[in-house]
Image: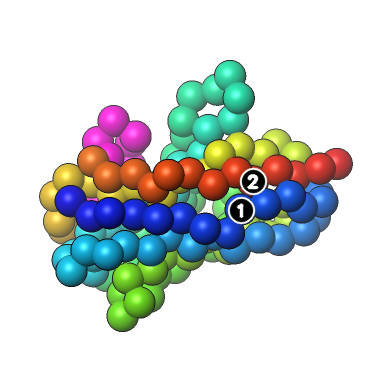
C-alpha cells in the first residue's frame, strides 16, 4: 500500500480553477494506478478521474470531461488534478486513492486500499 497526502483545495468562484496534488511517500508509487473521488454532503463517494500506473491512460467521469485533467509525475511521487471551469455542483471533499495491488486499475471506491485525508473544494455561484 501507499501513503497519500493531498493539498490544493479551497474556495473559488464558478468558472475558476484549482489544482489538487496528491503526494505519496511509497517507493512503489509508480506501479500503482491512482484515482480521484469526491463526496458531496448527503451523496455517495463518486469516481471523478483516474490514471494508469504509467500515466499513459486516463479516464474521467462524464460530469468532468473536458474540464478536469489528471496527470502524474512519478519522479516526484505526485498526482495532480487540474480543475477548470468549476461549477457549484463540483463542491465536495476530494480524495485521491490507490488500489491494494500494483498494475491493476479498479475505479470503484470499494476496491481502493489507500486514501488521502481529503481536501475541501467549494465553488460559489
Is 25 rendered above or below residue 118? below
What is the x, y in percent for residue 46? 47, 34
Instruction: Judge by depth and name the residue closer to the eye, 66 or 51.
Output: 51
Q: Is residue 111 magenta?
A: yes
Instruction: Judge by depth and name the residue closer to the eye, 50 or 25.
Output: 25
Q: Secondary structure at mark 2?
A: strand
Q: Which residue is drawn at the image coordinates 38% and 68% (left, top)?
A: 78
- Residue 8, located in which quarter of the rendered image? bottom right
What is the x, y in percent for residue 40? 59, 30
Question: What quarter of the picture does the C terminus occupy?
Answer: top right
Residue 84 in view here: yes
Left/right of residue 42 with respect to residue 88 in the rendered view: left
Disc 2 vs disc 1: Cβ atoms closer than 8 Å? yes
Left/right of residue 33 with respect to residue 91 in the rendered view: left
What is the x, y in percent for residue 97? 35, 47
Q: Which residues are magenta?
A: 104-112
Q: Which mark is residue 9?
A: 1
Q: Is residue 39 magenta?
A: no
Q: Which mark is residue 115?
A: none
Q: Secondary structure at mark 1?
A: loop
- Residue 16, located in which quarter of the rendered image? bottom right
Classify mark 2: residues with Cα within 10 Å, few (<14), some (14-19) or many (20+).
many
Residue at which label 2 appears: 121
Left/right of residue 21 with respect to residue 58 in the rendered view: right
Amino acid at each position: 500500500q501507499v501513503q497519500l497526502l493531498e493539498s490544493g483545495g479551497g474556495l473559488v468562484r464558478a468558472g475558476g480553477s484549482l489544482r489538487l496534488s496528491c503526494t505519496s511517500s511509497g517507493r512503489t508509487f509508480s506501479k500503482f494506478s491512482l484515482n480521484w473521488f469526491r463526496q458531496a454532503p448527503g451523496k455517495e463517494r463518486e469516481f471523478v478521474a483516474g490514471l494508469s500506473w504509467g500515466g499513459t491512460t486516463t479516464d474521467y467521469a462524464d460530469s468532468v470531461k473536458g474540464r478536469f485533467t489528471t496527470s502524474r509525475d512519478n519522479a516526484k511521487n505526485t498526482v495532480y488534478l487540474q480543475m477548470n471551469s468549476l461549477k457549484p455542483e463540483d463542491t465536495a471533499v476530494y480524495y485521491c486513492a490507490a488500489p491494494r495491488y500494483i498494475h491493476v486499475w479498479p475505479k470503484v471506491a470499494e476496491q481502493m486500499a489507500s486514501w488521502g485525508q481529503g481536501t475541501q473544494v467549494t465553488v460559489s455561484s
